[in-house]
Amino acid sequence: MTLFRQREDGTFEVLEHTPFADLEKTLEDWIEANPGILFDGEPLAVIARQPRNTHGKYLDLLAIDRRGATVVVELKRGEAPREVLAQALEYAAWVDSLSFEQLDQLAAAYAESRELDSGGLHDLYRAAFDGDDEHGTPADPSLVTFNNQQMIVVVAESFPNEVEQTARYFRSRLGADIHLVQFGVHTAGGEIVLEASSVVGREAVRPPAPPKNEGANDDAVRGYVKSDWMRSIVGFLDRWAADRGDPVLVVEHPNWNRRIRYRGVELAYYYHAQRWISLQLTGATQEEIARLRSGLTQPEHIKERDAGTWCRLYADQDVDLLERILVERIEELKGKAAT
């Protein structure tokens, strides 16, 4: 795209393309300081620069978006080579293997190297996203599942047709969240003008069609979670409900999320994160909330919301407490139905 600048007389002049001796590093500096360049001003939290993966290679920038998805940013000067997508996918696969603790260590090391007032991932997240949404809502990293998804962003001055076509195929047919961002650097009156435009990335990500009844497929969930305890606990409420033998006690699987209802009344709503179960105790009473705070292994993650109270289950102790609360709720509902 050619950029023009209006002169005082109303005519326009072309902004000259500006070569840089070390453009890749310069652009890395700019994006690190202004990551919103990549997505029309949408903020990102940079958490690492040039981290080294297990194969001894260095990815350019690693960031987090507001959802907690990790963003792998790979920069290329000139035209992107054909192998850039394979390289970026390799980096994304490595990032996907990282635990929260490993990401937190990367973020803490990055903050220390930049002399930032930050203790790690949560602090960098808050600094980037506090009050940035349309409601000015404070960022709450305790509600975010970090590294649940990976986004790949390749930035180059141009892309050959085969790279663009392959990236669009990965995105629209295989469900990979890949973006190609084309940039150009120009000068205008001694000032630098940076042009950035999306080449691939505005299309909707279309995941592969799941198998029939994928929402109820415990094997798919076991393949997703990342701890032995999580694999053992998948489907625990289904088994618990079946063991009670009560036909009006059901666990619904509309998708990967699950709801437990008794006589049509929702008792709880939950989903499997990679290392814990995120559960909403619907309409929790103050007494129940107090029991959660005193009985859960990690009560600091409890969040009270209008629809109910969110908590995380990390161990058998947490599951046992939840089951006791659900049994008491069911008995109360039975009593009301009998009167």
Image: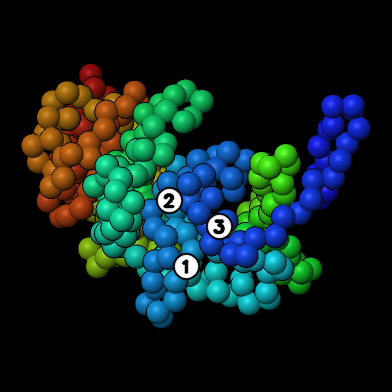
Identify which residue is drawn at 18% across, 39% down: 300
Secondary element at image label 3: helix
Q: Check contact, mark 2 vs mark 3: CB within 8 A.
A: no
Q: Is residue 59 left or right of residue 165?
A: left
Label located before the other in sequence (1 or 2):
2
Q: Along the line of sight, which residue is nearer the eye, 314 or 162? A: 162
Quick one: 158 or 336, which is closer to the camera? Answer: 158
| Amino acid of disc 1 | Leu
Q: Which residue is mark 1?
A: 59
Disc nearer the start of the sequence (2/3)? 3
Q: Secondary structure at mark 2?
A: strand
The image shows residue 92, relative to residue 315, as above or below, that is: below
Q: CA distance from mark 1 to mark 3?
A: 15 Å
Q: Residue at x 39, y 58 (%)?
A: 48
Q: Which residue is mark 2?
A: 46
> In the structure shown, which secondary structural element does the residue marked by tag 1 occupy?
loop
**Residue type at mark 2?**
Val
Residue 277, label in figure: none
Q: Nearer the viewer, mark 1 or mark 3?
A: 3
Identify the image quadrant of residue 335: top left
Question: Local crowd at mark 2 within 10 Å, few (<14), some, or many (≥20)?
Answer: many
Q: Quadrant of the C terminus?
A: top left
The residue located at (12%, 29%) in the rendering is 290
Residue 303 in picture, x, y percent from top left: 26, 32
**Residue 243 seen by the camera:** yes
Residue located farthest toward the bottom when viewing the structure as drawn:
55
Residue under circle 3?
26
Query: What residue is drawn where x is 41% and y is 80%?
Result: 55
